[in-house]
Amino acid sequence: MIAFILLNFINLAAAQGSGQGNVCLGQKTCGSCIAAGAMCGWCRQEGFDHDNHDRCDLLEELGKHGCDDAFTVRPDHSVEYVKNLEVQNAEHGEDAVQIAPQEVTIQLRPNKPYVLDVMFRLAENYPVDLYYVMDLSYSMGDDKDKLAELGDALAQSMSEITKNVRLGFGSFVDKKAMPYVSIVPQMLISPCTGCVAPYGFHNQLPLTDDTSQFRTRVDAAPISGNLDAPEGGFDAIMQAVSCHNDIGWRDVSRKLLIFSTDADFHYAGDGKLGGVVDPNDGECHMDGQGYYSESLSQDYPSVSQLSHKIADKKVNVIFAVTGNQVPIYEMLSEYIEGSVVGELANDSRNIVELVRDNYDKISSTVELKTNEAEGVNVIFRSRCTGENITETAKCDGLGIGHNITFEVSIEVTECPADKSQWSNSFEIYPVGLTEKLVVNYELMCECECEDSLVEERNSPHCNGTGTYECGACTCNDDRYGKYCECDGSNLENDDYDAACKKTNTSAVCDGKGKCVCGICDCNPITPGDPTRRYSGKFCDCNNYACDRHNKMLCGGPTNGKCVCGTCVCNPGFNGTACECPTSEEGCRASNGLICNGKGDCECGRCNCDIDSDYRGPTCEDCPTCPGRCEQNKACVQCTAFQSGPYDSDYCLANCSHVVVRDQISDKGGKKMCRFQDDDGCMFYFVYEYKSDHVEAQRTKECPQPVNVLAIVLGVIAGIVLVGLLLLLIWKLLTTIQDRRELAKFEKERQMAKWDTGENPIYKQATSTFQNPTYAGKQ
């Protein structure tokens, strides 16, 4: 890696030559020269500058101009391993070591990255301190009982992770003042049936390896009560983290704080409602009985205070909260380093699984961070558990004994004005662990030949008015020039001004500086900031006025540098802001062609031909073409499902690039393919654009078989039900009609009036007949 960086600098130097793009030119001292860049060197050879050659120049240019290699000052990095214990498990009474080395001292040259290898390994039986902080307000009564019941199971579960585990227990309610709790005298004594007086925080059980006490103390802990919904959890967390000795945290251990509640939290400023106006000081305040003694004297902590204290004490917090509180604690977790959120059942019955799962999540992840690294650019790179090295400080999926190596690039871009800052240090630490790597660095901002023991004051080389060091003169305050030959009183001399003009009509030093003994002394670009100045022989260069990419000048130091208003790109980049990689590897298709022969590679990306059907990052996707999906279909069938046109022998010989997995994803530049197999089921696989690698999903998606019997029985049942329904409707209509007819008949019968004298068919019981034959005769 170091050789690669050095090669880049040498190539950059060759590309720049000795013109205005050369950042080495114009450096007046050996210290400023070696700090200008890794490609710069200083010639301390006597008389080298007699032909107006700059003593500070590219190493190649110094040799061309006759500087003997023995007189070339070009210091390089060096490292001393102060403490470098090998990583080891916690065995035979020795502490575990998970990060190596532990302390280094680096002689660091500015503007040249130094790459340090840092190893991390998850140790077996690493000490674990688990402190359980529980909300014991009235609503958490059933949770406390369940936790006491599961206390032994929790201890047993943690002992399966490590043999070196300690458990502790603390509880909290809220501040003992209105409006947090009722101040009615009787309620202050017992706010609810069977409850004790409210309190801020109580350390019920300091961390102990006698895990049997955990269940006893939890079971004995009484419930209390408060008024408002939020609780005083922040007070409890601050005391549990700050009170190192009272809680019993060990110096070398993974510290876990389980925070269990069903409510949200009070934070800084809420204390004013109860008349508590003094801010929280973030210190330990615990009396002899384990109670938080400043609950009514100090406000609740702020989120920022908690975040800094937890990070400083290297504590991992697991927020075990009920479902309705998960969203708010997830937002809180984003601001607290090394914390996670787990959903707690209403009665805490899943606490053992929750602690175990979240511990696994925390312990299987390593993330490196820096502390007090101001002014230092630190970049982390690692392969993690894959094959390709990437820029990352975080690796997931670690197991016991798994070694991870991080390449840590350390670079300082300028020498501080305060010489006391030339020697400094910073820390690299894994989140949530007390182990760390201390990096001491000493900046090479001054050459050895500038040391007071070897310098020559009032030297004849400097006309007796300057100090001769590193082959050059450093003049006294009232003298100027290469050999201190210039008197400060002659600064307005026209002869000197002429040497500071590009042409006869140009302004002196381009109007951006003053001519000092024939040499331009350039002004600061921004008044009050002497570190950013115009540069160049005539102050005509501005090294801070270049195009930006990703909000950085010339894409940042990895892409290029701003030289005289123009970006000078490092090898491998071009463009006005050095935003474009020159390599076409990012455009190379799996068949080796650039953009699959279907487009042009511009700025490291493929622009596919408009009249072509091919699309995608390497112009290999063609929705209307058979493509690689069709090419790999048969191999996937025979490898994953023993189906398709290929027999087993052919499959074994030609389909080794297919890997079968339980789950597949098209993320990371992969293409998803979908086909129907011989049995009518759908199968899936993905391929990578830049390789022949294919991943097939082990399971298919098959349609559910048709249940013919159920359909037949359903149809019959439906017909019967419809028939019964129709009969019921017919019977109902018939009944209604009959009742209507009967009602009509009854009505007419009641309205009828029968009279026998008027009945036309009525006959008397007797009849009278006359015989005409015997009419008138006796």
Image (cartoon, grey):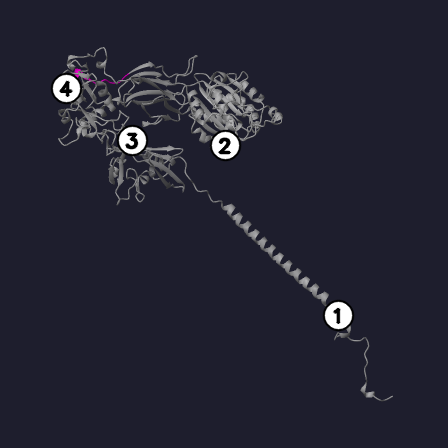
Q: Could you tell me the amino acid type at mark 1?
A: Trp
Q: Which mark is residue 744?
A: none
Q: Position of residue 508 (x, y in %)?
A: 17, 28
Q: Do tag 2 and tag 4 residues touch (Cβ < 8 Å)?
A: no
Q: Crowding near pointer 4: few (<14 within 10 Å), some, many (20+)?
A: some
Q: Do tag 1 and tag 2 residues touch (Cβ < 8 Å)?
A: no
Considering the numbered disc 3 on the image, is that residue within a helix, a strand or a loop?
Answer: strand
Q: Could you tell me the amino acid type at mark 3?
A: Met
Label 1 to label 2: alpha-carbon separation: 90 Å
Q: Say which of marks 4 and 3 sits in front.
A: 4
Q: Say which of marks 3 and 2 sits in front.
A: 3
Identify the residue under disc 1.
Answer: 754
Give 436 or 674, whichever is nearer the viewer: 436
Of mark 2 and mark 4, the one earlier in the sequence is: 4
Identify the residue under disc 2.
Answer: 325
Of mark 3 and mark 2, the one earlier in the sequence is: 2
Of mark 4 and mark 1, the one earlier in the sequence is: 4
Considering the numbered disc 2 on the image, is that residue within a helix, a strand or a loop?
Answer: helix
Q: Which residues are magenta?
A: 62-78
Of mark 4 and mark 3, the one earlier in the sequence is: 4
Q: Crowding near pointer 2: few (<14 within 10 Å), some, many (20+)?
A: some
Considering the numbered disc 1 on the image, is that residue within a helix, a strand or a loop?
Answer: loop
Q: Which mark is residue 552?
A: 3
Q: Which mark is residue 49?
A: 4
Give 645 or 602, whichever is nearer the viewer: 602
Magenta span contains residue 381: no
Considering the numbered disc 4 on the image, is that residue within a helix, a strand or a loop?
Answer: helix
Label 3 to label 2: alpha-carbon separation: 41 Å
